[in-house]
Every structure is written in structure tokens, then in C-alpha cells.
């Protein structure tokens, strides 16, 4: 207790000297547990301007999308190295007592897992740190229903969501996502599943900042289910059965995570690296065209804005589930509340918004969701003991979101190198009206488009492809 008290007084005494802010929850946790996971922020961080200048310079020189990503990566890592130098030097002195350190160049922060009281005391003496705090907790958007489905009852041509958006019409034209890579930020992936095993891109295809598995795995099942809807090639469960995927396991086996884990995954997708460390052979040429995100925070939280902005500059479409908080207004989860997010609501097989899909407007009074997709009773691959042929039926906006990611893969198959703005325009142009439920949010009835229930409507594969 005496050491804890001295730390509090140290923070107060140094306030006039511009010492870092130490939040009270961090101090309590250190007092009670002795260690804490921390997120370190810096006074001289200028991520937005550094990124914008790098991207503008690369584009002015006529650089390719890979060149733009590389320019952004080089500029942001150089900025982070300079800004974070003294803090990393201090952390290295305590390296034997902490669990893991991940420098986050994409937001210019440092994630430290298992920081000790002594480390936090030492960091509090550094004048270039603005804040040391416990990262906020978030996690999986849990499905509202779940049931296992016997393999014998899963038949190709019978998945209602795939039929509702008419993905087979694209396949008939030879457009199945071949040559396209998409990303999943979820609970991981069972890459041995029969529907996924030929679609995993092993080259720079996996990172796990939360449990540190060096090979792809999924002990929760949610990630495997959503990836199956994106591109599963068995029994007609996937929208883009010719595409490949990479995965970042941003959540643990219980579906829990912190903002630091999500940010670490966010930078992985811009320049995929080896599973050992973000600085191990980053390859900006191996980024996906979209990332599916079926996680979020209740309420308005802009912590992911810098990541989303970087994704867009890198040509990566940020697709986020709206949330499963029901039909009350202002229930969209963040980061789906952000203007730049492609936010997805859920529809049922009656072509109506489901009774669980979160509703806008956002806390910034933006019309949200952006679009909607099938999200009720969606059959896809699952994990069950040692079986690689398991399936389950689940409901939630988490199930709607991968339909959109799969459609984006089809769009890139037809027309490679689309910008995120072009992708979003095609999704919106192809969206079809849903059956109104008579509800109104933000002064907009759900029979008017866009609205705060289904956005511009339910996606249509043929209509969006035709809009390119």
C-alpha cells in the first residue's frame, strides 16, 4: 500500500512538469493485482498528418496501391520509432517482467501486457508520454441464436442468404472471387475445415496479438462461421467461393479483447507480417481488399478511427456489424458509428429488418447502418471437437457482415484495384428495398432510403456488379 500511495503522490507532484496522465483504474489494478495491461500514448504523435503526407506524396508520384501502403508504413513506423524511443528503452529494462510488448505504429501507441508497478512508475517520469492507461475492453458481437446443424442436412443451393442476394448469378458468369484476398478480424479460423482448407492464404496470413498462437486456430467458432459465409466452397455456404482469406485473432476463446488487440490486428492487415511480431517481414503488397469485423463497443467510441482511415488509404474496405441491441434508435455499435465504416444491418428471409439488428442514427447523427444483408438463421461452418465438417445455424449482424465482405471480393474479381469509395458506391447502387416494418428512427421511416434501419437496403450481387 505504501508503494501504491507513493505512486499516486508522484503523479500529482509531477503534474506541473507535464508528466503522463495515469488513470485511476490503472492505479487500482496495480494495487490489487501487481500487474496490468497498459496502453501508452504520446504527446508528439501526429499520425493523421504523417499518414496524409505520405499517401499524398506516393499518389503524386503515380505510385501503385502497394506503393501507397509502403509509403504510409515507412512514414508511420519512422514517426513511431522516433516518438516511442525513450518509452521502449525504459520498457526494455523491464522486459523480463512483462508478458508482451507490441509497438503500434498505426496509432503511435505501445501495448504492454503484464506491466508492473515499477514499470509504470518509471514511465511516469518520462516527459514525452501523454497517458498511460488500461485499454478499454470490447469483444464479440454475440449471435442471438445458435444451433448445431447435422452435416447431412446442409445442401448446396439451399442457403437462403446466398440465394437472397443472388450470388449464384455471379458464379454463372465466372465471377467467384478468384485471385482476391479478404480479411477476418475475429476469434480466429479453423483452417482445416473442409469448406475453408483450400482458401487460407498461409503466406503472411495469420496474427494473434491476444493469445499469441503462431498458427491459425479458433477455439470459439465465431470466426470460422463468418469466414465460411464469406467464401466457404462446400455446400454453397460462401458468397465468394473462389477467394482466399487471411485472419487476425483479435479476440480470445471467450470472445473478449481490448482496444490494443483490435489496433494490433488493424495494422496487421495494412502490411501483413509474420505471426511472431509486427516488425517481422511486413509485406504491404499482401493486404486484403476488405476486412470483416463482427465485434464492437456499445455506444460511441472513436478509438478505431485512425485504423479505419489507414485501411481506406490502403484500399481496404472497413466492414462492421451494426450490433444486436434490438430495434431501439441510437443502438449502432462503434466502430460502426464512424462515418467511414461500411456498417451492416441484418435482414430475415421475409426481406425485413430482424428484430435484433441495431438501429441508427449514430451518435454523430449519421444515417446508419449503410446497408443490410441476410443475418438470421445463417448456416455456415463451425468447430466441434475434432470434426472438420461441422456446421451451425446462427443469427446476428455478425452473420450479415460476411455476406458483404464476400460481395466485395466479387466486385474486385470483376474490376480489380477498386477504391473503397468505388466499392461503397457499388454496394449502395445495388441495394434493394426491404419490406417496411412501419418504424421510424431519426425522423426517417424505414420505407424511405437510406434509413436508420436497413440503410440503403439489402445487398444484391448482380445489381452491384452491374453498377461497376
Image (cartoon, helix red, strand yellow):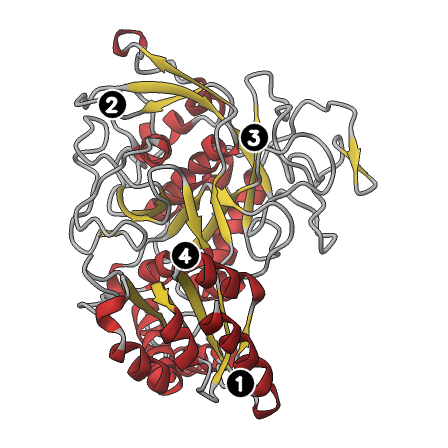
Q: Residue at x 21, y 70 (%)?
A: 96
| Relative height, residue 218 to residue 3 (above, below) | above
Q: Are marks 2 and 3 in contact (CB under 8 Å)?
A: no
Q: Which residue lies most toward the right here?
A: 443
Q: Return the residue found at the far top.
A: 152
Mark 4 vs mark 1, CA separation in Å = 24 Å
How far apart are the alpha carbons under marks 2 and 3? 23 Å
Pinpoint residue 414: horizontal percent, then vertical percent.
35, 45
**C-alpha distance separating marks 1 and 3:** 47 Å
Q: Is residue 24 left or right of residue 219?
A: right
- Distance of label 3 from label 4 (alpha carbons): 41 Å
Q: Position of residue 85 (x, y in %)?
A: 33, 85
**Residue 295: x percent and y percent?**
47, 43
Q: Which mark is residue 19?
A: 1
Q: Which residue is mark 4?
A: 33
Residue contact at pointers 4 and 1, CB within 8 angstroms:
no
Left or right of residue 209: residue 368: right
| Precedes in sequence: disc 4 or disc 2 | 4
Residue linked to disc 3? 346
Q: Quadrant of residue 442?
A: top right
Q: Which mark sits nearer the N-terminus, 4 or 1?
A: 1
Amino acid at each position: 500500500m505504501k508503494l501504491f500511495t507513493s505512486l499516486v503522490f508522484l503523479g500529482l507532484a509531477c503534474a506541473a512538469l507535464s508528466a503522463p496522465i495515469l488513470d485511476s483504474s490503472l492505479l487500482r489494478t496495480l494495487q490489487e493485482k501487481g500487474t496490468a495491461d497498459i496502453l501508452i500514448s504520446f504527446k508528439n504523435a501526429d499520425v493523421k498528418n504523417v499518414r496524409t503526407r505520405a499517401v499524398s506524396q506516393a499518389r503524386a508520384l503515380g505510385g501503385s496501391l502497394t506503393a501507397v501502403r509502403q509509403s504510409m508504413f515507412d512514414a508511420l513506423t519512422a514517426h513511431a520509432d522516433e516518438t516511442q524511443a525513450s518509452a521502449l528503452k525504459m520498457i526494455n529494462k523491464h522486459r523480463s517482467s512483462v508478458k508482451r510488448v507490441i509497438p503500434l505504429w498505426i496509432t503511435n501507441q505501445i501495448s504492454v501486457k503484464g506491466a508492473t508497478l515499477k514499470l509504470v512508475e518509471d514511465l511516469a517520469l518520462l516527459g514525452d508520454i501523454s497517458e498511460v492507461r488500461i485499454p478499454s475492453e470490447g469483444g464479440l458481437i454475440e449471435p442471438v441464436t445458435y444451433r448445431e446443424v447435422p452435416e447431412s442436412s446442409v445442401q448446396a443451393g439451399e442457403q437462403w442468404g446466398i440465394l437472397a442476394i443472388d450470388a449464384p448469378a455471379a458464379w454463372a458468369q465466372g465471377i467467384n472471387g478468384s485471385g482476391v484476398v479478404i480479411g477476418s478480424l475475429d476469434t480466429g479460423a479453423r483452417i482445416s475445415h473442409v469448406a475453408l482448407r483450400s482458401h487460407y492464404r498461409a503466406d503472411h496470413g495469420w496474427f494473434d496479438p491476444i493469445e499469441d498462437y503462431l498458427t491459425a486456430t479458433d477455439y470459439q467458432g465465431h470466426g470460422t462461421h463468418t469466414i465460411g459465409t464469406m467464401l466457404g466452397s462446400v455446400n454453397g455456404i460462401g458468397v465468394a467461393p473462389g477467394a482466399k482469406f487471411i485472419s487476425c485473432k483479435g479476440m480470445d476463446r471467450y470472445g473478449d479483447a481490448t482496444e490494443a488487440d483490435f489496433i494490433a490486428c488493424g495494422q496487421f492487415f495494412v502490411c501483413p507480417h509474420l505471426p511472431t511480431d509486427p516488425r517481422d517481414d511486413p509485406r504491404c503488397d499482401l493486404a486484403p481488399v476488405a476486412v470483416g469485423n463482427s465485434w464492437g463497443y456499445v455506444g460511441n467510441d472513436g478509438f478505431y478511427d485512425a485504423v479505419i482511415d489507414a485501411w481506406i488509404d490502403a484500399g481496404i474496405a472497413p466492414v462492421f456489424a451494426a450490433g444486436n441491441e434490438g430495434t431501439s434508435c441510437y443502438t449502432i455499435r462503434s466502430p460502426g458509428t464512424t462515418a467511414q465504416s461500411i456498417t451492416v444491418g441484418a435482414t430475415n428471409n421475409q426481406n425485413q429488418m430482424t428484430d435484433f439488428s441495431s438501429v441508427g442514427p449514430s451518435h454523430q447523427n449519421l444515417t446508419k447502418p449503410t446497408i443490410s444483408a441476410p443475418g438470421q438463421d445463417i448456416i455456415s461452418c463451425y468447430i466441434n471437437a475434432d470434426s472438420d465438417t461441422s456446421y451451425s445455424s446462427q443469427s446476428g449482424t455478425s452473420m450479415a457482415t460476411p455476406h458483404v465482405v464476400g460481395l466485395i471480393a466479387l466486385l474486385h474479381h470483376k474490376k480489380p484495384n477498386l477504391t473503397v469509395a468505388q466499392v461503397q458506391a457499388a454496394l449502395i447502387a445495388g441495394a434493394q428495398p426491404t419490406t417496411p416494418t412501419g418504424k421510424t428512427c431519426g425522423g426517417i421511416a424505414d420505407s424511405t432510403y437510406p434509413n436508420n434501419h436497413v440503410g440503403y437496403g439489402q445487398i444484391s450481387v448482380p445489381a452491384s456488379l452491374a453498377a461497376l
